[in-house]
Image (cartoon, grey):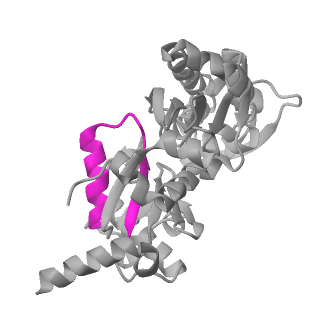
Amino acid sequence: MVKKIKRLIGMVSGCFGGFLGTDIGVDLGTCTTVISVRNKGIVLNEPSVVAVCKKTNVVLDNGQAVGMIAHEMLGKTPASISAIRPMENGVISNFQATEVMLSYFIKKAQSMTKSGLTKPRVVIAVPSGITQVERRAVIESAERAGARKVYLVDEPMAAGIGSGLPIGDPTASMIIDIGGGTTEVAIMSLSDIASCESVRVGGDSMDKAIISHIKRTYNLLVGEIRAEKVKIEIGSASPLEQELTMDVAGRDTVTGMPRKVVLTSEEIREALKEPISEILESVIRTLEKAKPELAADLIDNGIHICGGGSLLRHMDTIIENATGLKTIRVDDPMQSVAKGTGIYISNIDVWKDSMDSVDD
């Protein structure tokens, strides 16, 4: 009898998901998780960070030390606590922490939209280059976090749809999504990927390059948060009309004492050359693999860029110079993927068979 009731609930919720449950789209990023709810739009945008007790490996505050709360602890925790990012290079590196984080975000999204009589169906955007084992790990973590059914969509597809590109038309649409852990480069046509590259280089790689430069040049240790601030405030991919400077404080590696130095935008640009070059190489490889007719379309259609890394000054200019194709930063580049998952969940009953999932 109980099984029959559960089956009936499942059938009803499948037909009236918007009434009984909450269909959710998730951009599960290395640095940030953005959640879109069906018919509500984006409702949550928080850092992908979890604070755990080192001794027990349990999330603090009964699983509440997640997102913004945990992000404020990065680099400032005592020896007994660790603030970690459970996602690394776009894939799960800590399963338990990822499960807790997803559960927290899903429940928070449901509470914000005052829905959730049944478990939600969830669409999650994942890097196109991850393995089947890594895809299965994402699905299982989301199911344990409270999802009724999990579907995966490749990030370039979600980014293209969320950016408003005509990916369903018989013409080439090219997207470059520069995230925290990965950069996704894809040429799409007729609702599928025709040519793509997924490289594990992104905003985090840029931050690490800055940390390494400061340590090597000034014998000064700085944390990830401070390095990211340097990137945002004075970082650039090509020369600026007016170069910038910034005071940065850290710990001297020789004396162990706090110290401050003045950084210039020129030296930070030099430090960023390696990760930016890797991104450009992936763009060139993707173009080289494209069919001639699709490559020709890009003369008129150009390249679109999104993701947090696209906000680096002159990132569009350096891609345009390297490819000879006009390069456009999309509107609201930080939320393109989440918007795309939102469009997927709005059409989930039509598109679900084309997405990765695990059969019931």
Name the image quarter holding residue 298. top right
Question: Is 263 placed left or right of 199 in the picture?
Answer: right
Q: How many marks?
A: 0
Nearer to us in this view, 144 or 219: 144
Res 222 visible: no
Question: Is 8 placed left or right of 206 in the picture?
Answer: left
Question: In the figure, 117 relative to 87: above or below?
Answer: below
Nearer to us in this view, 86 or 245: 86
Question: Is 317 placed left or right of 142 in the picture?
Answer: right
State the quadrant of the C terminus.
bottom left
Question: In the figure, 56 relative to 201: above or below?
Answer: below
Most distant residue in the bottom direction: 1
Identified at 32% across, 52% down, the residue is: 138
Question: In the figure, 5 relative to 255: above or below?
Answer: below
Query: Residue 178 at x, y = what percent?
Result: 57, 37
Question: In the figure, 356 relative to 285: above or below?
Answer: below
State the quadrant of the N terminus.
bottom left
Most distant residue in the left direction: 1
Identified at 63% across, 50% down, the residue is: 334
Query: Residue 130 at x, y = what percent?
Result: 34, 37
Query: Residue 284 at x, y = what percent?
Result: 56, 17
Residues drawn in magenta: 120-144
